[in-house]
Image: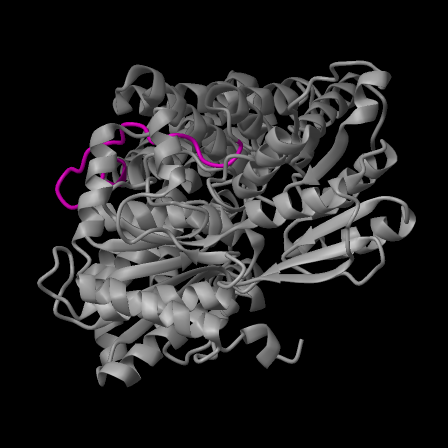
Amino acid sequence: MLKFNRKTVVLVAILLVGLLVAGCGGGNNQDQQGTQEDQKESLKVGIVLSSGGKGDKSFNDSAIRGLERAKEDFDIEYKYIEPKQVSAAEKGLRFLAQNGYDLVIGVGFMQQDAVDKVSKEFPDTKFALIDSVVERDNVVSLTFKEHQGSFLAGALSALLTTHDEVKGINEEKVVGFLGGMNMPLIHKFELGYTSGVDYINEQEGINVKVKVAYAGTSPDAFNNPAKGKEIALSQYNAGADIIYHASGGTGGGLFKAAAKQGKYAIGVDSDQDWVQPGFVLTSMLKRVDNAVYQTVKAVKNDNFESGVQEFGLKENGVGLTPLTGVGPTVKTAKELGDITAEDVQTIKEMKNRIPEEVKQKVKDIKEKIIAGEIKVPNYLEQQGE
Amino acid sequence: MEILTQIFSLETLSSTLRMATPLAIAAIGGLYSERSGIINIALEGLMLAGAFIAVVVSYFTGIPWLGLLGALVFGGLFAMIHAVVSIKYHADQVVSGVAINMLAAGGTVFMLNIIFNTSGTSESVNALPYWGPFKPTVYIGLLVVFIAHYVLFKTPFGLRVRSVGEHPHAADSVGIDVEKIRYICVGISGILAGLAGAHLSLGVLDSFREGMTAGRGFIALAAMIFGKWTPFGALGASLLFGFSQAVQIRLQGLGIPTEFVQMIPYIFTIIALAGVIGKSTPPTAIGEPFEKGKR
């Protein structure tokens, strides 16, 4: 059937171009400048990003920010790779290891197997894995206590939804959770959030309900803002006035829905307060930048240690963006022209609507979690992992 | 009881319509192409490209309607790759469709990097305004279905399209330009897929997100097959799929396994294909390249 005639050649050519375009699309922040001698001095760090890539205004951007900071402080050079599929991540890691990168970072739990395999092949290269664990002498695993940050988000939501004098808050005591792909790591966010709500219910003797929905069961579910919007609209219509999301790019739809309904959203991973000014109450930060920065610093100072490093509220690895005023990311967004000065003002005004009493209680809860007085359940540990 | 009122509320029904719109429009696009005998699994990629171009044009001009127009034009042009490869070079139509999908997935991210300097989400642009409770694309989508029914079954052009898809050689023998009809139909399918994409990026949202069609092009294909290659059938199937999604969203967290609810549309499609709910027969000459004079 298949002969090497013209049509086959044309088809193969198109396929190849398609594959090529789909396969690459990475970037090099330093376009092979300098000679071998120049590069001997500076530390070379390579990073393989997770799905969503650079510009996800979330996880990956946070990691890049950490590297940018490290670049300023320690004179490193870095290269990032954006794999189009999970299977391509392994190739990316191997490419970096082969090309003499001193530290190779894999972003995302989906790269666990890839980091495991490649770190075995290159025992002299140092690896870091974000969000999952690989036990090997040349690998450091950087994980986060997302449940603690989510607990704070839950407590804030439950406290605020009872204040129906605040603009955008209705009488019904309902809040929402929007998950991306239905899987254990996202359940960790969900359980943290619902536990936060439950804690407030117990303390205040109220009965706030949480609506929970997931966008899907495949990685697509992190890239489906249209569905995210529908889910958010359904929760707002069911009485929710604050929705927390852990859904990557799908959350973009939540912000649109919040703006349409005049209700609130809570961002995740990086500071998303500015994405829809006036409607994103706060964001549950996952300081991937801090984790990356500290790992680079450790390699630079020759005190790299393998094993698991967990970043929680105590280590400033997770937390909420300021409930009064705005964080540094919002200011950067203004400098870059992504938002205007009025937008910043809108965000500040929105934050001022949160009653002082609520802010104080959230702060107390944070202290209690750090002190160990409140134990936040970790879904992954409950599952015996 | 609470569950039932939630399922059959006005809110659920309008959510159904919103989610069915991109499926129905793309399914009608697929319908034109397949009725003329060209398999079009490139809908997903054409939609994605349309969604992207719509945002880009709206970004540079500030006028969302021009973005919509841009998506239509580009969708039609992009589909021409599929048309030329399938019609002129008689290549395997499924493989060509897969190539288009990959080209769109990679190409949009590539261009996103160049234009917006990011590979995740584009900047927010001016989106289409509301017309009453819905965005204009929802009404346009319904109109597209009725027009497709009229064109395909009530006009000489429609007759030609169907004859080309059923028996191209017979059509050829009575003087119908088979290749021209097929080019036009694949073009229309690209235009409609572009419209479906623009509905997502400028109707539902106001920005482009990498891979934001999330498989809708393939569900549209399923809707077309489930609808037995007829416009109203495709609309009905799209509404059913939209409804099951809307229900699935609302049933989550109520102790009903939502994965099961999510499966329902696909179970229906398989049943339809197996011929239980009446036979679902594709156009006879589908997937066969037309070579003049050859029998």
Across and down, in percent, residue A189 comes to 47, 66
Q: In front here: A363 or B148?
A: A363
Across and down, in percent, residue A230 comes to 32, 54
The residue range painted magenta reads B119-138
Q: Is residue A116 magenta?
A: no
Across and down, in percent, residue B122 comes to 43, 31
Question: Residue B113 is drawn in which quadrant?
Answer: top right
Asked if residue A234 is positioned above or below residue B200 in the image, the reply reads below
Q: Write the residue at 53% across / 32% down.
A: B119
Q: How is the image coloured?
A: one colour
Across and down, in percent, residue A355 comes to 17, 61
Residue sticking out furthest to the left: A165
**Residue B19 seen:** no
Q: Is residue A214 left or right of residue A306?
A: left
Q: So how many labels did they put on this image?
A: 0
Q: In front here: B87 or B52?
A: B52
Quadrant of the drawing holding the C terminus of chain A: bottom right
Q: Main structural element of the magenta stretch: helix, strand or loop?
A: loop
Q: Write the residue at 74% across / 21% down.
A: A13
**Residue A284 seen:** yes
Quadrant of the drawing holding the N terminus of chain A: top right
Q: Is residue B40 left or right of residue A74?
A: left
Asked if residue A239 is positioned above or below residue A103 in the image, the reply reads below
Asked if residue B194 is positioned above or below residue B228 in the image, the reply reads above
Q: Write the residue at 49% across / 42% down.
A: B217
